[in-house]
Image (cartoon, rainbow, N blue to C red):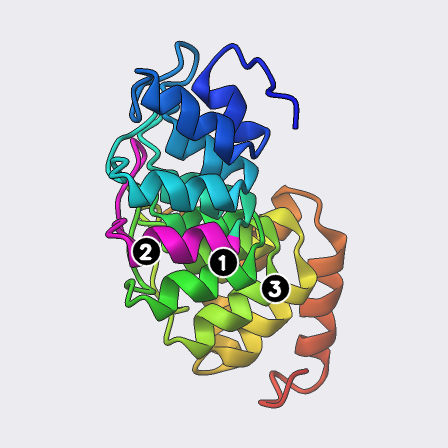
Amino acid sequence: KKMQNYASVHEAVRAGDVEQLAAMIQSGAGINEVDLVHNFTPLHCAAHSGSLECLHWLLWHGADVTQVTVRGWTAAHLAAIRGQDACMQALLQNGAEAEAPDERGCTPAHLATAHGHSYTLQTILRSGANVNVSDMNDWKPVHYAAFHGRLGCLQLLVRWGAHIDDVDNNGNLPAHLAAVEGHLHCFKFLVSKMASVAHALEARNDQGETPRDLAERFYKDNILQYIDSVEKEGKYPETQD
């Protein structure tokens, strides 16, 4: 097999070439050396590109799972963003911190949720991560699921005990955020899971706005039509689907 010439150990990892990775490290390349653009280590590259064999090799040879990029991301954050489930499992089994915050306070659970990777999110939760962990704006993973319209992640989070009546630092429930973005499936699901439909539809954020007010302000007709239909059906029947 012809040996490829890679400009850096990072390139070898992105290509999934574990033999070249090993040869380059043994010839003196640093196992934790960072690229100049993003401060990616080889481990970051492996998690990002899903180069599982390289990731295992790096972990076995002592790569640092705590090292962060310019945005404060560990390799686990990158596995979360990319939905690299097998890489996430390997990282968590080798001491990666499931609740490590990035520069905005986002943990891997927040990022897996924002990008809609429910399998990776489940891997993170199974490792014992807090389902109700907050970022700097008091957004929990459920807020990210609602805002980004990630219904599968939202349902998973609720099954794991997420608090859907927790507010962020502007007083927004996840239901407010789903209304702002017009994510009807998520909005319906949240309304169905709240203590009562009235509680969901009449909740006010710190600006005094209900989900209806926000849907009006951001022209989300699908949310408005749904709220109208619920209100028409005799002031909140308790079984909404």
Residue 183: % across, % down: 66, 56
Q: Is residue 74 left or right of residue 190?
A: left
Which residue is painted at 32% across and 34% down in the image? 104
Q: From this view, report whether residue 63 is shown above or below residue 200.
A: above
Q: What amino acid is labelled 3 in the image?
A: Leu
Residue 180: % across, % down: 58, 48
Mark closer to the chain start, 3 or 1: 1
Q: Is residue 233 magenta?
A: no
Which of the 4 quarters of the picture holds residue 160? bottom left
Q: Which residue is mark 3?
A: 151
For marks 1 and 2, give the CA distance: 11 Å
Are discs 1 and 2 less than 8 Å apart at CB?
no
Which residue is painted at 28% across and 63% down in the image? 130
Which residue is painted at 49% across and 58% down in the image? 120
Q: From this view, report whether residue 4 is shown above or below residue 180.
A: above
**Start and end of the magenta stretch?**
85-104
Q: How many marks?
A: 3
Single out the mark in the foreground, 1 or 2: 2
- Quadrant housing the C terminus: bottom right
Q: Which residue is mark 2?
A: 92
Q: What amino acid is labelled 2 in the image?
A: Leu
For the residue carrying disc 3, how many other residues have a C-alpha within 10 Å: few (<14), some (14-19), or many (20+)?
many
Residue 210 visible to an observer of this rendering: no
Q: Secondary structure at mark 3?
A: helix
Q: Secondary structure at mark 2?
A: helix
Q: What amino acid is labelled 1 in the image?
A: Thr
Residue 112: % across, % down: 48, 51
Of the numbered discs in the image, which one, if any, rests on residue 120?
Answer: 1
Q: Is residue 92 left or right of residue 174?
A: left
Q: Secondary structure at mark 1?
A: helix
Q: From this view, report whether residue 9 is shown above or below residue 86.
A: above
